[in-house]
Image (cartoon, rainbow, N blue to C red):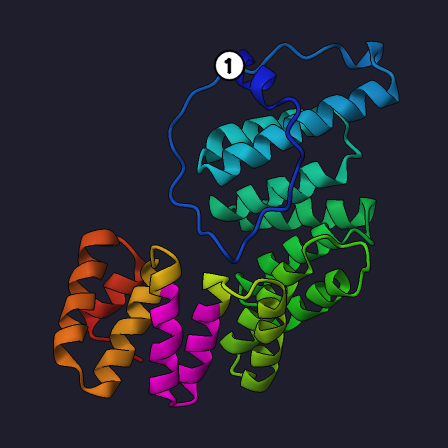
Amino acid sequence: MKALHRIFASCCFRAVALTLVAVSSALAQQSVAPPVEPLSSMTPKDAHTRAKLHTELGSLYFRNGDLIVALEELTIAISIDANYAQAYSTRGLVLYQIKEFASAEKDFQRALDLAPKDPQISNNYGWFLCNTGKEKESIEYFRRAINDPLYQTPALAHLNAGTCYARINELDLAEDYIRKTLRYMPDNPQALLQLANISYKRGNYDAAKEHLKKVVRLSNPNAEALWLFLRVERRLGNSSDEISLAAQLRRKYPDSPEYQEFLKGNFE
């Protein structure tokens, strides 16, 4: 664990991109927390620096799927500096992944209390709301992030807003936000996947297929992409392609919600 601290001590904290990558189940990895300097001996600057370091490490573990270690690092960060908003925001994302929704909500609210104008925190909280059945409420927070001229990753907030609008079938607004994402990142697979989803919802299956072909060319398609592609081919009457995609879904993502829907025959 100490070696990891030395390796990553210089890493810059970056926003966790939520809609672009789903984290699987937590790995039962054990770690020994480093000795923490007594708080009474730290200056405010020292405490902030230490908390920032542990938050950066927590974010890296989170992105690698090590949720238990990520949670440990972020909790250490908060114990060092209870006013470090980014630690609460990132821990909220981790708590969401382990389905501790009430605790995640509490952490996001604390982060917003500490830094109400922080665009990254607004985007993260919007993502949380969107994924807990509060899509309409989430849009306000994505807009806050987008409207901040200092926000370094507005494409993420545009993508998240478009995704949430698509979920509630506000397809024109969804497409508008997704196309703005593509202005920043023309080959973003998740944005192209959302365009395919919008086309599918509109009944434009040929357009959906073209978008999905780009997704497959640019990335290793996730379960959501394969499931949508399967349903598009089913709508187009391409049974051989449908069978091939079903086999891929079964082989790559047998435990995914999408494959479970396939087994149930829930194609819509």
Can residue 224 be spotted in the picture?
Answer: no
Q: Main secondary structure of the magenta part?
A: helix
Which residue was labeled with disc 1?
A: 32
Could you tell me which residue is drawn at 60 percent across and 67 percent down?
Answer: 181
From the viewer's perspective, is 234 left or right of 75? left
Q: Position of residue 255 (x, y in %)?
A: 26, 53
- The answer to whether residue 247 is above or below residue 92 is below
From the viewer's perspective, is 95 left or right of 208? right
Outermost residue, bottom side: 203
Question: In which quarter of the view is residue 30 placed?
Answer: top left
Report helix, strand or loop for mark 1: loop
Identity of the amino acid at label 1? Val
**211 inside magenta stretch:** yes
- Closer to us: 208 or 63: 208
- The answer to whether residue 90 is above or below residue 11 is below
- The answer to whether residue 195 is above or below residue 37 is below
From the viewer's perspective, is 78 left or right of 100? right
Magenta part of the chain? 192-215
Q: Position of residue 20 (x, y in %)?
A: 50, 56
Q: Position of residue 254 (x, y in %)?
A: 22, 54
From the viewer's perspective, is 228 left or right of 143? left
